[in-house]
Image: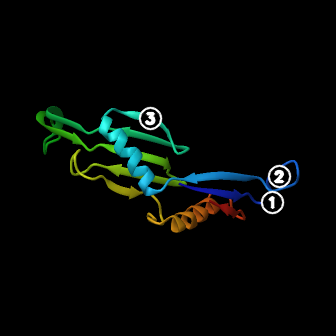
Amino acid sequence: MKTLQVSMPTSLPTTENGQLLSIPVTVPTLDDILQYAKALHAVGRPWEGTAFGWPADYTPEIREENAVFEEYDERGQPKTVTGLRWSPAIFCIGINEIWFVSLTWEFGVDAEPWVYLEDDYGYAFDEATQVKMLKKRLQEQSLVGGKLISST
């Protein structure tokens, strides 16, 4: 896990001793996320809460062999059909405007999940690039002028 200290622009409030206000931000590693998501996946029940300080949720696979659907024919008339209804298991963590990762079990519940970062910058598998990417995103999200003051 990577903990960052982000300094806010000087136009924002300072602490009692005049230092710039700073916000600690924790970014889990991909291994942390995978381990957490796989534990939830093994239980197989819906979950919603906080993981590593970020909002997160898990939805198990949905599989209905004889689901009933309403479809429309070429004339726009409704008709009832029966078929497979399927949705993969999915784990999501983060806030899309800042940092967001989803894992989907697209190839079945026993397969490895597909990892996707919904971010303009792609996913960084090494922590140094994660720090750089998060710093850039935070500065673009109303923190312009802020700076990274520590990283552990």
* Tag in front: 1 or 2: 2
Between the C-alphas of marks 1 and 2, the distance is: 8 Å
Badge 1 crowding class, 10 Å Cα cut-off, few under 14, some 14 to 19, many 20 or more, is few
* Residue 117 marker: none
Identity, as a three-letter code, of the amino acid under mark 1:
Thr
Query: Can the viewer see residue 142?
Result: no
Identity, as a three-letter code, of the amino acid under mark 2:
Thr
Query: Where does residue 14 sit, x and y in percent of width and height?
Result: 83, 52
* Tag in front: 1 or 3: 3
| 107 on left or right of 139 | left
Query: In terms of sequence position, does the residue under pointer 1 or pointer 3 come before the other?
Result: 1
Identity, as a three-letter code, of the amino acid under mark 3:
Glu
The residue tagged 3 is 48
Query: Can the viewer see residue 5?
Result: yes
Q: Is residue 100 above or below residue 82?
A: below
| 36 on left or right of 128 | left
| 16 on left or right of 35 | right
Badge 2 crowding class, 10 Å Cα cut-off, few under 14, some 14 to 19, many 20 or more, is some
The residue tagged 1 is 10
Between the C-alphas of marks 1 and 3, the distance is: 36 Å
Q: Secondary structure at mark 3?
A: strand
Q: Secondary structure at mark 1?
A: loop
Asked whether the residues under the numbered discs 1 and 2 touch, taking CB atoms below 8 Å apart as contact, a structural biologist would say: yes
Residue drawn at point x = 30 percent, y = 52 percent? 113
Q: Secondary structure at mark 2?
A: loop
The residue tagged 2 is 14
Splitting the image into 4 quarters, where does residue 19 fall?
Answer: bottom right
* Numbered-mark total: 3
Residue drawn at point x = 40 percent, y = 34 percent? 47
Query: In terms of sequence position, does the residue under pointer 3 or pointer 2 come before the other?
Result: 2
Q: Is residue 135 above or below residue 64?
A: below
